[in-house]
Amino acid sequence: MLTMNRRAFLAAAGVAASNLADAAALAMIVDTHAHFYDPARPGGVPWPPKNDTLLYRSVLPAEYRRITQPLGITGVIEVEASPWVEDNQWVLDLAAKNSVIVGTVGNLEPGKPNFRENLSRFHKNRLFLGMRFGYLWGRSLAAELPKPEFISDLKFLAGTGLELDAVGGPSLLAEVVRITDQVPELRIVIDHLPYDPPTAEPARSAYQTALRELGKRREVYAKVSNVLRRSDGRVPTEVSFYRPSLDELWEVFGPDRLVYGSNWPVSDQIAPYGTVFRVVREYFAGKGREASEKYFWKNSKAAYRWSTRG
């Protein structure tokens, strides 16, 4: 029995090593979702709160590179974690000094008087790739959708060639359907899939209907950045545990519209970066080299239109 256990351990270690070697062999790996911020700067930060002992610290590119370079990560898109308009510039200034950042998704409010002015200002920088909107900072997509000025500004956003990151929960999907009905040319990336679907009807059926409908809309991408879960007091690391939810996204969006995101450092609340990465790496390795290349960088290049840096 001891011999068999040792053999099984060595076999599993060999598979893990092979997966990591294959990951390093990919042309690029671009993480489309990480946050950078610094509570030590003058004025501090609006997030995370000071009582969050895990997240309330300086989170900057040097730490990100130290953690991710051994895994073969070659670039990252910063997603803005502040509602302050000038923090968009703070991140752009940070990106100018750190070539690992291939772009940033800003935080602006469509429908507000200064939206177009601010968007045009930041869009002059090629590292500004789009903006995020949804259920953050007390904002509500459902409340904004009926407003003509909101939809008009989304059309303006689409006209610039920038994208929209949509953030929320299961009900968000039906609202993204409504956006694409009115602004079909707007590229949208849905953050933090897979969601835990509603368990009760009719919410569950509405969720499934919206998910399937978005699968038909070619300008909508799914960011797979919310995979690992706690279950029975532990966080499973076996890809088999997550295969059903990943298979559903694969079936709906196909190989061309799934993108990799870590949600670091928030992901540390569940598991270390390397653990989160290995689960999706193993899953997509099973889909073949071409599918892995698409998931880990090619699809995000189509969604965000980022450019390679130094």
Image: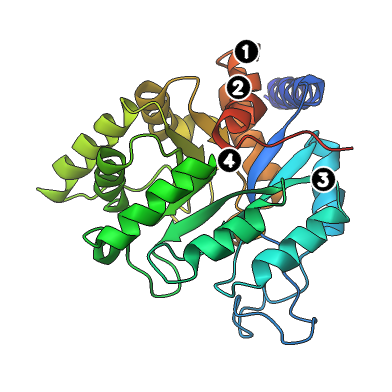
Above or below, 8 against 122 in this view is: above
Q: Earlier in the sequence, mark 4 or mark 1?
A: 4
The secondary element bearing badge 2 is classed as: helix
What residue is pinned by disc 1? 290
- CA distance for labels 4 and 1: 24 Å
Q: Assess disc 3: are there few (<14), some (14-19) or many (≥20) residues with their C-alpha within 10 Å of its C-alpha.
A: many
Q: Assess disc 1: are there few (<14), some (14-19) or many (≥20) residues with their C-alpha within 10 Å of its C-alpha.
A: few
Residue pushed farthest left?
Answer: 202
- CA distance for labels 3 and 1: 24 Å
Give the residue type that dot 2 points to: Lys
How many marks the image carries: the answer is: 4
Quarter the N terminus occupies: top right
Marks 4 and 1 in Cβ contact (< 8 Å):
no
Foreground: disc 4 or disc 1: 1
Q: In the depicted view, which residue is nearer to us: 86 or 30?
A: 86
Foreground: disc 2 or disc 4: 2
Q: Position of residue 125 (x, y in %)?
A: 72, 51
Q: Position of residue 128 (x, y in %)?
A: 66, 51
What residue is pinned by disc 3? 100
What residue is pinned by disc 4? 237
Specify whether residue 79 is in view: no
Marks 3 and 1 in Cβ contact (< 8 Å):
no
Specify whether residue 141 is in view: yes
| Occupied quadrant, residue 309 | top right
Q: Assess disc 4: are there few (<14), some (14-19) or many (≥20) residues with their C-alpha within 10 Å of its C-alpha.
A: some
Q: Earlier in the sequence, mark 2 or mark 4?
A: 4
- CA distance for labels 2 and 4: 23 Å
What residue is pinned by disc 2? 294
